[in-house]
Amino acid sequence: MSKIDQAIAWMEQRKGKVTYSMDYRTGPHSYDCSSAVYSALHEAGLLPKSTGLGSTESLPFHSAVLKNSFRSICKGI
């Protein structure tokens, strides 16, 4: 399974099982948008676990995508 598939699987495993919260965003029962993305990328090995949970503005998403050859993932977003 590719790393991006692992990140997607992490998200899918939590669908309907977690709540949205900006106050309690560190999991495992609640996340906000960016902490969920960071957590999925951590678990997939696309970001070092030493990288803290940042905000959408600090997400190194673009560089992680390019580093892993997922150039089309942002197309159409």
Image (cartoon, rainbow, N blue to C red):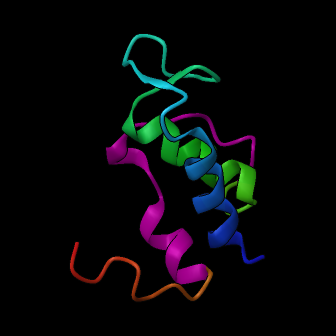
Residue that protrudes farthest toward the front in the picture: 16
Which quadrant of the figure has residue 22?
top left
- Does residue 65 sit above or below 25 in this rendering? below
**Residue appearing at x 50%, y 48% in the figure:** 37
- Does residue 69 sit above or below 12 in this rendering? below
**Residue appearing at x 42%, y 70% in the figure:** 62
**Residue appearing at x 60%, y 23% in the figure:** 27
Is residue 55 within the magenta segment? yes
Please give the range of residues in magenta: 48-67
Number of disc labels: 0
**Horizontal and vertical percent for residue 70?**
52, 84
Residue that protrudes farthest toward the top in the picture: 23
Is residue 38 within the magenta segment? no
Q: Is residue 72 left or right of residue 17?
A: left
Q: Is residue 67 left or right of residue 60?
A: right
> The C terminus lies in which quarter of the figure?
bottom left
Q: Is residue 59 left or right of residue 27?
A: left
**Horizontal and vertical percent for residue 51?**
65, 42
Along the line of sight, the residue nearer the viewer: 5 or 57: 5
> The N terminus lies in which quarter of the figure?
bottom right
Which quadrant of the figure has residue 44?
bottom right
**Horizontal and vertical percent for residue 65?**
51, 75
**Residue appearing at x 40%, y 46% in the figure:** 58
